[in-house]
Amino acid sequence: MTETLYVRAHEPGTAERVVNELLDREHVSPERLHAYGKRLPGGLRVEATRWRSTALAILPGAVVGAVAVPFLWLVVVETPSDVATLALGLIGAVAAGGWSLMHERRKDSPMNAQKRAMRHGDLLIAADVDDSEADAVERRIADSHPEVDVLGSDPAQRP
């Protein structure tokens, strides 16, 4: 069995050092590590997910919806008036933007607990470690990296 340990780093360079230590010294395989953050370090040796603010999470869907709905109406029904085009674009933007936000927040569930920290540029590292090793790994990270917050198995924990 494994347990997921969460570590919050305040700087991308620190996050990269912690990830490298987990890979090299703790022998955690890259498939068992994941980094989340707004500013991800380049060359990170594990899978990473970029955190986006609410506005940036809505934007891609809103743009697609604002363009696609009036275009589909034109193709399927008829040429809409200027007011109808504007209304259809607004409806498409709201619907697709809402879907985009829900999709973004659902897939980024560990990050949701650290939304405030992510907004300020912190990075979250999730490491799946063997249950028997979890406490020792957690202690070694805390001892060798006092500049990070070791959250344990609860990403919502506040150190």
Image (tube, rainbow, N blue to C red):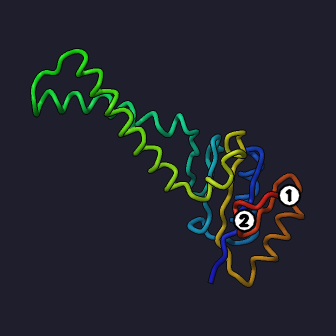
- Name the residue type under label 1: His
Q: Which residue appears at 68% of the width and 52% of the height?
A: 114
- Residue 73 on image: x %, y %: 17, 30
Q: Gap between marks 1 and 2, in whole Å?
A: 12 Å
Residue of label 2: 22
- Name the residue type under label 2: Leu
Quarter of the figure with the N terminus: bottom right
Q: Which residue appears at 32% of the width and 32% of the height?
A: 91
Q: Which residue of the protein is positioned furthest toward the top in this rendering?
A: 82
Q: Is residue 51 left or right of residue 141?
A: left
Q: Which residue appears at 84% of the width and 58% of the height?
A: 159
Judging depth in this view, the residue of 137 and 102 nearest the camera is: 102
Q: Secondary structure at mark 1?
A: loop
**In this rendering, which labeled residue sits more in front, label 1 or label 2?**
1
Label for residue 145? 1
**Which quarter of the picture shows residue 70?**
top left
